[in-house]
Image (cartoon, helix red, strand yellow):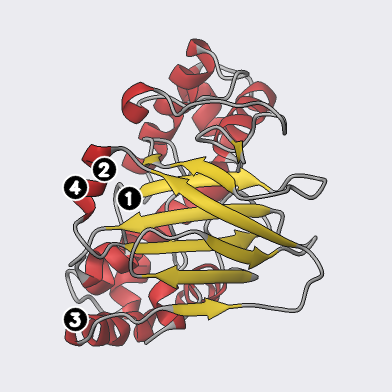
Amino acid sequence: MRAYSADGNLPPGTVAAAPAGDVAQADQLLNADAADLVLRATQYLRTHFRERLTVRDLSEHLAYSPSHLTRVFTAVVGTSPMDYLAAWRLHEAKHLLVTHRLGVAEACHEVGYTSVGTFSRRFLRDVGIPPGALRRLADRISERTLPAASLFMPSPRRLRIRLSLSGDQRRSLGPSPHQWIGTFPRPVPSGLPATGTLRRHIDEVELPVVPSAPWVLVTVLPDGASAHEHLAPTRPLVARLRVPSSPVPGPVTLPVRTALPWDPTVLVALAAMVV
């Protein structure tokens, strides 16, 4: 059995425990300066997401060159600052649609878009369903229990995955948590997974892996999670792993941690696969 770090980036063969309290990534390349820079960058983007920001605006605010900022940000977060900003706008739009019941056009303009058509196309691409359908999906989730489900495609290679949780994490999740595990093209839960599975408890799973989706991403939500928690989670339990380049005998163990302040938001509406 092979264990990987909480961010999935340690070289295969390295055995690492999850960091104490899940307050920092275990990636050995991440230092305090990089963490501080990324934290300040994401805080600024989340605060000013309605504005027409560029990477130069962000770099001037932080007093770093655009190239250095983009390089450090992408290495830590897994996506560029502008992609992160676009994802946060859609996350805020999901919140407005589900919790405040805003119309599509209202939500579009509230999060900084000027074109409803552009907003709707990007929403469909990254969330997996049209913005108008998200509210209807929230109503359906509120009325029923999500069943177990799988999304597979033919592949000669498979990867067994086992999650590692602390006693406190297990108690906070309740008796039947929602365990989502999927494979994605990037270390960002955006767009529908290539392969994936939902279980109603913490369980070892086996997924087909394909070259076009080399990242395993995990989201765990508590038993009794609300429709808003399913569709626009704020600080879920997460894990990620870059699929090892060579086959791994036995299961890979992934430590689960609370989403960090700079983690990309869970954009994809995973519940759309099962209701």
What distance separates the C-alpha of mark 2 from that of mark 4? 5 Å
Q: Secondary structure at mark 3?
A: helix
The quadrant the C terminus occupies is bottom left
Q: Quadrant of the N terminus?
A: top right
- Which one is in front in this view, the residue at disc 2 or the one at disc 3? 2
**Residue 83 vertical position relative to residue 26 in the rendered view, above or below:** below
Q: Where residue 241 sits in the image (x, y, percent)?
A: 61, 45
Amino acid type of disc 2? Gln
| Structural distance between the alpha carbons of marks 3 and 4 | 23 Å
Question: Which residue is painted at 36% across and 51% down in the image?
Answer: 50
Out of 223 and 187, give the one closest to the viewer: 223
- What mark, if any, has residue 236 been given in the picture? 1
Left/right placement of residue 205 relative to residue 98 reads right
At 36% from the left and 84% from the top, the residue drawn is: 132
Residue drawn at x 62%, y 61% is 183
Q: Secondary structure at mark 4?
A: helix
**Residue 181 located left or right of residue 139:** right
Q: Mark 2 and mark 3: span between their CA atoms? A: 24 Å
Q: Residues within 10 Å of mark 4 (few under 14, many from 20)?
A: few
Q: Are marks 2 and 4 in contact (CB under 8 Å)?
A: yes
Q: Residues within 10 Å of mark 2 (few under 14, many from 20)?
A: some
**What is the three-letter code of the residue carrying label 1?**
Pro
- Give the image location of residue 270, x and y in percent: 44, 71
Label annotation for residue 169? 2
Q: Which residue is mark 3?
A: 142
Q: Is disc 1 surrounded by few (<14), some (14 to 19) or many (20+) residues within 10 Å?
A: many
Q: Mark number for residue 160? A: none
The CA span between labels 3 and 1 is 19 Å
Q: Which residue is mark 4?
A: 171
Compared across the picture, whether 68 is left or right of 163 comes to right
